[in-house]
Image: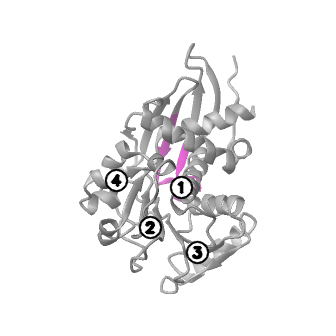
Amino acid sequence: MAIPFFDAAATVRLLSFADLVGALRTASTDLLAGRIVSPERTVLPLQEGAVMLSMPATAADIAIHKMVTVCPANVARGLATIQGQVAAYDPHNGLPLFMLDGPTVTARRTAAMTILGIQALHGMAPSEVLVIGTGTQASSHVAALGALFPAARVYVIGRSLAQAEAFCLRNQTLNARLEALMPDAIPASVEVVITLTTSSTPVYHEPDMPGRLVIAVGSFTPDAAEVPAALVQGSVLYIDDAHGGRYEAGDFIQAGTDWARVRPIADAFSHAVPVERPILFKTVGSAAWDLAACRVARLGL
C-alpha cells in the first residue's frame, strides 16, 4: 500500500496556524494528564558533526514518529540543514497513515506553540511584538503572528540592521507589519518578546518589565541561553514540556532554576497568570506537538 507523502508546500496547506494552536492546547493538557506518551528524544551521531533525531509519541487516536537529521555541512552544499519526515500510524493495527515534511511540521508547530503561549499568558492580542532572529523559525513566527494577530506591529532584530531589513523585505508577504530595529532601540511599549536565534549567549538584555512576556525558543541545549539568568530568576516561569526541559532548557539550567517554580503551559489554561513580574515562557519542543500536528493534518485529508 502506497503511503501518502506530503511535501513542504502540501504540509503547509494541511497545517493552518489556527488549527495548530487549538490542537496544541489539547495536546498540552493530554501530555500533562498522561494521555500522550512522548519519551525523551534519541540523538545518534552521523558524519561531519551531523546528528539523527528520533522522536516518537503515541495517543489513543494516533501514533507518530518524527525522524530528522541536522547536518551543518549542508549549508556549503546548498542544502537545508534539517531533513526528515513525520510518519503517522494507526495506533490499533500499526498501519502507516501518511507522512509529512519534518522541517515544515517543526517550524509551524513551534510557531503555533508560541501563539498559544501569547494567548494563555498575555491574555489578549498584542499590539507590539519583538522578534529577535532572522532564520527559518523567525519566518514561521512572523507568518503565525500575521495570521492570528494581523494588527500587531512586529519589530525584528538581527545581527545587523541590514540583516533585519533584508528579513523584513523577504517576509513581507507573510506579514505586512514588519519593521527592522537596532538592538538598542526596543520600544518600552513592546508587550511580547520572542527570541529565535542559535546563539549560546543571551541576546535580550532589557530591564525587567512587569507583565512583559518573553518567549525563549532558540536555545535547546543545556549549555546555551538566549536570556540572562537575572531575567529567569526574576520572572514567573512557564514551559511547554517540563520533562524535556530539565535536559534541554538551557535558559533555565544555566540560571540554576528551582524546577518547583516552573509551571507547565497547561497550568495557565485554568489558573490566573501573575503579572506583577515579567513572564518567561520557555519552549523546548516535544514529539507530542508533532502528534498534535498530525491530528490536524488527518482531519484535512
Label located before the other in sequence (4 or 2): 4
Q: CA distance from mark 4 to mark 2?
A: 15 Å
Q: Which residue is mark 3?
A: 156
Dot 3 surroundings within 10 Å: few (below 14), some, or many (20 or more)? Answer: many
**Residue lying farthest bottom?**
185
Q: Which residue is mark 1?
A: 120
Q: Which residues are magenta?
A: 66-83
Q: CA distance from mark 1 to mark 3?
A: 23 Å
With 26 as the anchor, is 283 left or right in this view?
left
Q: What residue is shown at x 43% (from left), y 31% (from top)?
A: 34
Q: CA distance from mark 1 to mark 2?
A: 12 Å
State the quadrant of the N terminus.
top right
In the picture, the disc for residue 262 is 4
Label located before the other in sequence (4 or 1): 1
Q: Quadrant of residue 134?
A: bottom right
Dot 2 surroundings within 10 Å: few (below 14), some, or many (20 or more)? Answer: some
In the picture, the disc for residue 243 is none
- Callout 3: SS: strand
Dot 4 surroundings within 10 Å: few (below 14), some, or many (20 or more)? Answer: some
The total number of labels drawn is 4
Residue 196 to residue 188: above or below = above
In percent of width and height, residue 111 lies at 58, 55
Q: Is 131 colored magenta in this rendering?
A: no
User: Which of the two marks, 3 or 2, is nearer to us in this view?
Assistant: 2
Say if mark 3 contacts mark 4, CB within 8 Å: no
Dot 1 surroundings within 10 Å: few (below 14), some, or many (20 or more)? Answer: many
